[in-house]
Amino acid sequence: MDIVYIRDLQIQTIIGIYDWERQVRQTVSIDLEMAADIRRAAQTDDIQYALNYKAVSKRVIAHVEGREALLVESLAEEVAALVRDEFNVPWLRLRVSKPGALRGARDVGLVIERGEKPV
Ligand SMILES: Nc1nc2c(c(=O)[nH]1)N=C([C@H](O)[C@@H](O)CO)CN2
């Protein structure tokens, strides 16, 4: 199994459960690992056969910027579902973190894996 990844995609959005968090945009950082078979893209050197990480990141940014979720859990499930559905990704690992959201910690967040790993 090959992996196409995006690391530390930083997006400004409204997120959080507290009143102050509904007033200001915070940074959310996303790491995404997506199962892919890269061989056809490698053989042809043609982007149409690649899982285009630029296209994925644009779609993720558009969703996260417009969402205004309360929980990182909601955001994570939504991003995982749209990446799997719209980009035909059979398995992914997604980390959603909020840098600086917790005093004393560099960041907080979660990691989810969805789908089946291809053999
Ligand atoms: N499991 C979670 N715990 C917490 C979340 C969350 O989204 N998922 N959110 C908060 C607050 O919004 C926090 O980030 C503000 O400091 C607290 N715990």
Image: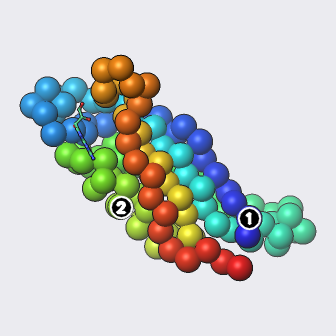
Quarter of the figure with residue 78: bottom left
Name the kind of residue labelled 2 in the image: Glu
Name the kind of residue labelled 1 in the image: Asp
Ligand 1 picture quarter:
top left
Give the image location of residue 55, x and y in percent.
57, 55
In percent of the image, x 31 and y 28: which residue is there?
101
- Front residue (pair 92, 66): 92
In percent of the image, x 37 and y 55: which residue is there?
76
Callout 2: CB less than 8 Å from ligand 1: no
Quarter of the figure with residue 24: top left
**Circle 2 sits on which residue?**
77
Give the image location of residue 74, x and y in percent.
28, 56
**Circle 1 sits on which residue?**
2
In percent of the image, x 44 and y 58: which residue is there?
112
3 versus 5 height, above or below: below
In the rendered image, the quadrant that contains the N terminus is bottom right
